[in-house]
Amino acid sequence: MGLLEINLGDEKKIIVYPKPNHEPATYTILNFSVDNIDEAVDELIARGVAFEQYEGQIKTDEKGVSRNNGGPNIAWFKDPAGNIMSVLEA
């Protein structure tokens, strides 16, 4: 595996690289702010991203979006290394 480059626009980028013996984080390591959570989730699903499903205090709907849980609408997914990331509606 090589480098993963995430283009943020305005020539801003995030570079992600592998680490030997990596253990995925058990918490959200990166949040992507979006204007419309449903549009963002639909587009990512169309590109093959699978969203996490949670029950209990942080319940998600069928798309993987947590709504009206005391914070912004948010949906979590894992990167190829198993780290948790999210899109959240700002």
Image (cartoon, rainbow, N blue to C red):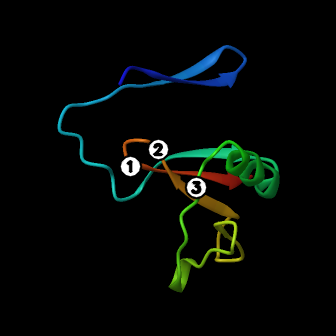
Q: Secondary structure at mark 1?
A: loop
Q: Residues within 10 Å of mark 1 (few under 14, many from 20)?
A: few
Q: CA distance from mark 1 to mark 3?
A: 12 Å
Can you give x and y, in whole percent of width and height, for residue 79 in the image?
A: 46, 44
Kind of residue at disc 1: Gly
Q: Residues within 10 Å of mark 2 (few under 14, many from 20)?
A: few
The N terminus is located in which quarter? top left
Give the residue number, with chain letter if any, for mark 3. Answer: 50
Q: Secondary structure at mark 2?
A: loop
Q: Residue at x 63, y 46 (%)?
A: 48
Pointer 1 and pointer 2: residues touching (CB < 8 Å)? yes
Above/below status of 1 relative to 51: above
Above/below status of 67 relative to 87: below
Give the residue number, with chain letter if any, for mark 1. Answer: 82
Image mark for residue 39:
none
Kind of residue at disc 2: Asp
Can you give x and y, in whole percent of width and height, for residue 24 in the image?
A: 31, 49
**Nearer the camera: disc 1 or disc 3:** 3
Q: Residue at x 38, y 49 (%)?
A: 82
